[in-house]
Image (cartoon, rainbow, N blue to C red):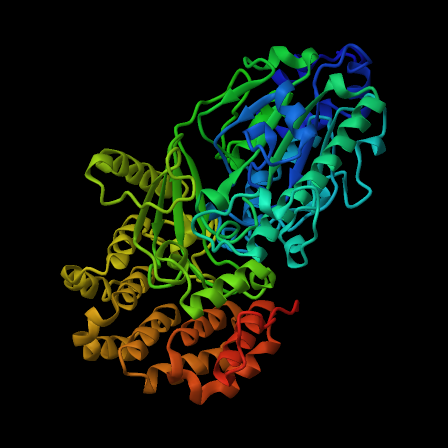
């Protein structure tokens, strides 16, 4: 078969399941020969990411937003009403967008700023597109939370990357652009614009202050600027005569950056816009007509499978997402999300949403929602919110952020978009609650969720956690669900689990006693004996914090300080300083150790600077402790 007559069907038939065959068959010259103008055998793709972006735009019914380009794109395309990012922060969600895997399936990819070790079988979806003859470009953002080979993933990656740089005018392309215009950092110094503070709605959980209103208005105004950037990319397609050959995908990388959004596994932190415009020439690839709405949930992890399917490229076996458009589209009942370590603070939330309800499970309820994070606290709205909390001027709904969490949350988003009325104890929603509980449990098991493994533990990882016997996830899930309930009737079970042969199970038993607080007071001697006998550093840290908070700080706090000062693993040190942050004045004798911790890495530096300011009495909500390392 000559390259001049090579058809897409013949190539895909010969190369199904083998990227090597596809790469050999579809060289740039062969692709150019088979995609002459007007006879193109596969569409181009323009993927436009908008950072830190809830669907606050006219296309989704927001009457305040000024987003003409997004609105027109939705009118000409397909709008997904319930799209979730895999995580409420950029790096873990970007891992999902690139690999088609949930980040929690490959620890530590589920944490913010980490590097997961991936097997050779897991590659970027753009690499599969390249193997099929596509020219793949990425304008910015390469923090994928994994050791992805950038030279294999992209033909070009950087500020100048563009489809216009492809080797031939008829070479198909996958061009990915990311705008930072409405990134969280823009909120650190807000500016006025077309949307005025008096026009915006303040969510019920936030205090209605001038600073909060101005931040919300600013968020709309930078969204307007990002919309214009999208418009310029669409205009470039028109200028190049490529609009009719190019499928355009517009989406957010995670939810918005306003308070209690980004970094939190609720609807504000996970819900993103997701719009796909399929031009008439390629309308036969999808069932939906222009202007359609899809109300069934999808996830960012579905992007790779969707693009590959629409391009006619085989979806690799490792991909966990599903195609949401095209002949192989799969209608899904649920979208999932996760929160793990965010910057310098540890937490563990897992979330599932259907079309109407969102269910959130808090595995570390003893930590408040509002843990101080240095980068996040540069936003004035967080500073004002905390100041009003300290002054006691908030109402109970607004003050909830500063307290500890319930184990479970359930919200009806059609009636309660601010997620302030927890329905977990409502009998009429019991069936929904149980259904979402089961769905979340099934998902955790299906993806082999690494989030229950302490960060940097030897079995953390896509390969390591799947070694038979290394990570008994079913047992871990059982004790992790028992631990946060703070139920004294669970004490005997937790004591049993504290003697388990697997230290991850023991870690969650120890976390259970930490979460139980004063209810575990009568067990101080037993916990002290377990602490003394324990060999695993990961288990000793929560046991030490539990003992210190029960009034037995001498050996326990000294241990935490020693870990902070001498352990060679920065993530173990970070776990120790988080524990020290919550033992209160018992850590004061070690303030010099805490102050010295600031020279290790960015997250330790920020955690240590904050705690030092608290102990020195110099901390206020406006104290700037963030400093990039």
Q: Position of residue 48 (x, y in %)?
A: 68, 35
From the image, which quarter does the C terminus lie in? bottom right
Quarter-of-image position of residue 161: top right
* Above-or-below relation of 398 to 235: below
Is residue 383 found left or right of 420 in the rendered image?
right
Q: Which of 620/167 is in front? A: 620
Q: Tell me the residue at 28%/42% (across/down).
A: 423
Q: Quadrant of residue 424?
A: top left
Residue at the image position 19 percent from the left and 38 percent from the top: 427
The quarter of the picture where the N terminus appears is top right
Residue at the farthest front position: 198
Q: Quadrant of residue 605?
A: bottom right
Q: Is residue 551 left or right of residue 259?
A: left
* In front of the other: 259 or 430: 259
Residue in front for this viewpoint, 104 or 190: 190
Q: In this figure, what is the number of numbered marks?
A: 0
Residue 158 visible in this rendered orientation of the protein: yes
């Amino acid at each position: 078969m000559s390259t001049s007559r090579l058809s897409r069907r013949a190539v895909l038939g010969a190369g199904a399941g083998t990227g090597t065959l596809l790469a050999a068959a579809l060289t740039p010259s062969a692709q150019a020969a088979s995609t002459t103008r007007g006879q193109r055998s596969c569409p181009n793709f323009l993927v436009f990411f908008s950072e830190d972006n809830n669907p606050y735009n006219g296309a989704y019914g927001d009457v305040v937003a000024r987003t003409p380009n997004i609105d027109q794109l939705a009118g000409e395309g397909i709008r997904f009403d319930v799209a979730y990012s895999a995580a409420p922060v950029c790096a873990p969600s970007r891992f999902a967008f690139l690999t088609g895997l949930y980040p929690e399936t490959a620890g530590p990819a589920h944490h913010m700023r980490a590097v997961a070790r991936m097997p050779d079988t897991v590659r970027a979806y753009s690499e599969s597109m390249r193997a099929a003859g596509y020219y793949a470009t990425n304008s910015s953002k390469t923090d994928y939370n994994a050791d992805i080979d950038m030279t294999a993933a992209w033909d070009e990656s950087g500020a100048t990357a563009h489809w216009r740089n492809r080797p031939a005018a008829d070479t198909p392309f996958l061009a990915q652009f990311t705008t930072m215009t409405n990134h969280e950092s823009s909120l650190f110094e807000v500016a006025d614009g077309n949307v005025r503070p008096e026009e915006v709605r303040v969510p019920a959980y936030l205090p209605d202050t001038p600073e909060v209103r101005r931040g919300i208005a600013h968020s709309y105004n930078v969204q307007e600027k990002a919309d214009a950037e999208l418009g310029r990319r669409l205009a470039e397609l028109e200028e190049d005569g490529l609009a009719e050959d190019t499928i355009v995908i517009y989406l957010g990388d995670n939810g918005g950056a306003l308070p209690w959004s980004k970094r939190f596994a609720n609807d504000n932190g996970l819900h993103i816009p997701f719009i796909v415009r399929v031009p008439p020439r390629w309308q036969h690839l999808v069932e939906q007509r222009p202007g359609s709405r899809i109300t069934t949930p999808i996830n960012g992890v579905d992007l790779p499978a969707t693009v590959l399917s629409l391009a006619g490229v085989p979806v690799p076996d490792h991909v966990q997402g599903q195609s949401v458009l095209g002949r192989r589209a799969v209608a899904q009942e649920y979208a999932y999300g996760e929160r793990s370590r965010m910057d310098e603070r540890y937490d563990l939330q897992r979330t599932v949403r259907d079309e109407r309800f969102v269910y959130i499970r808090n595995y570390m309820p003893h930590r408040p929602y509002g843990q101080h994070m240095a980068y996040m606290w540069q936003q004035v709205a967080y500073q004002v919110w905390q100041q009003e909390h300290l002054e006691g001027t908030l109402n109970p709904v607004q003050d909830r952020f500063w307290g500890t969490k319930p184990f479970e949350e359930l919200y009806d988003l059609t009636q309660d978009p601010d997620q302030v009325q927890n329905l977990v104890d409502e009998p009429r929603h019991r069936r929904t609650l149980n259904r979402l509980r089961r769905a979340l449990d099934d998902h955790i098991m299906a993806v082999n969720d690494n989030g229950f493994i302490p960060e940097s533990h030897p079995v953390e990882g896509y390969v390591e956690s799947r070694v038979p016997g290394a990570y008994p996830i079913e047992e871990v899930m059982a004790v992790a669900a028992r631990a946060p309930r703070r139920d004294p009737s669970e004490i005997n079970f937790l004591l049993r689990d504290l003697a388990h042969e697997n230290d991850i199970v023991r870690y969650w038993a120890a976390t259970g006693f930490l979460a139980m607080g004063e209810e575990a007071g009568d067990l101080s001697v037993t916990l002290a004996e377990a602490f003394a006998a324990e060999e695993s550093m990961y288990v000793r840290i929560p046991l030490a914090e539990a003992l210190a908070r029960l009034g037995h700080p001498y050996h326990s706090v000294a241990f935490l300080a020693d870990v902070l000062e001498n352990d060679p693993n920065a993530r173990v040190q970070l776990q120790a300083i988080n524990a020290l942050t919550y033992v209160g004045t018992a850590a004061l004798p070690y303030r010099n150790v805490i102050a010295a911790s600031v020279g290790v890495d960015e997250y330790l530096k920020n955690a240590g600077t904050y705690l030092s300011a608290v102990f020195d009495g110099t901390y206020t909500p406006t104290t700037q402790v963030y400093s990039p390392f």
